[in-house]
Amino acid sequence: LNLRLNRLTDDGCRLLLEGLQDNVTLKDLNIASNNAGGQTVQTLCSILRNPEHSVESFDGSGNEFTADHFELMRMSLSANKSLNSIDLRNNPGYKEAPRAVEEIEKIVHSNEYQKRKAT
């Protein structure tokens, strides 16, 4: 689902993700450059924590995710086994939270490796 540059705002992205919480077939989600922030991250994290969801690719670049948001995503991804591609560049927290970014990238890389190994 590619919603890049749709001017959804944080509230719009949150509402969209709330609507997708019951959709366990969604594989790719792109909400890049939509001015998304804290509300979006909260809802996204509930999706990423849910083992029934199988989102494999997420692009949240160019939004308003802060260091705290990156830390929340890191914690939510700790048990995630499906996400194997993520782009979070061009967010304020990307440079403010290098450890969280590094951990997120390690988790996603590990998921990608496990997926390739299984095929």
Image: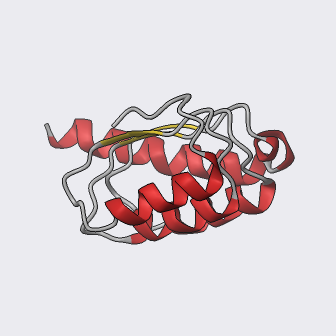
Q: Is residue 6 visible?
A: yes
Q: Position of residue 6 (x, y in %)?
A: 53, 33
Q: Is residue 61 above or below residue 69?
A: above
Left or right: 91 in relation to 11: right
Q: Is residue 76 above or below residue 87?
A: below
The residue located at (29%, 46%) in the rendering is 114
Q: Nearer the viewer, residue 102 or 71?
A: 71
The residue located at (81%, 42%) in the rendering is 92
The residue located at (60%, 36%) in the rendering is 7
Q: Nearer the viewer, residue 18 or 55?
A: 18
Quadrant (top left/top right/bottom left/bottom right) for the C terminus: top left
Q: Position of residue 110 (x, y in %)?
A: 42, 46
Left or right: 104 in relation to 55: right
Left or right: 77 in relation to 73: left
Q: Is residue 77 visible?
A: no
Q: Name the image quarter holding residue 28.
A: top left
Q: Name the image quarter holding residue 116.
A: top left
Q: Nearer the viewer, residue 103 or 8?
A: 8
The residue located at (74%, 46%) in the rendering is 64
Residue found at the far top of this picture: 5
Residue found at the far left of this picture: 119
Q: Position of residue 74 (x, y in %)?
A: 60, 60
Left or right: 118 in relation to 74: left
Q: Is residue 24 above or below residue 51?
A: above
Q: Is residue 95 above or below residue 19?
A: above
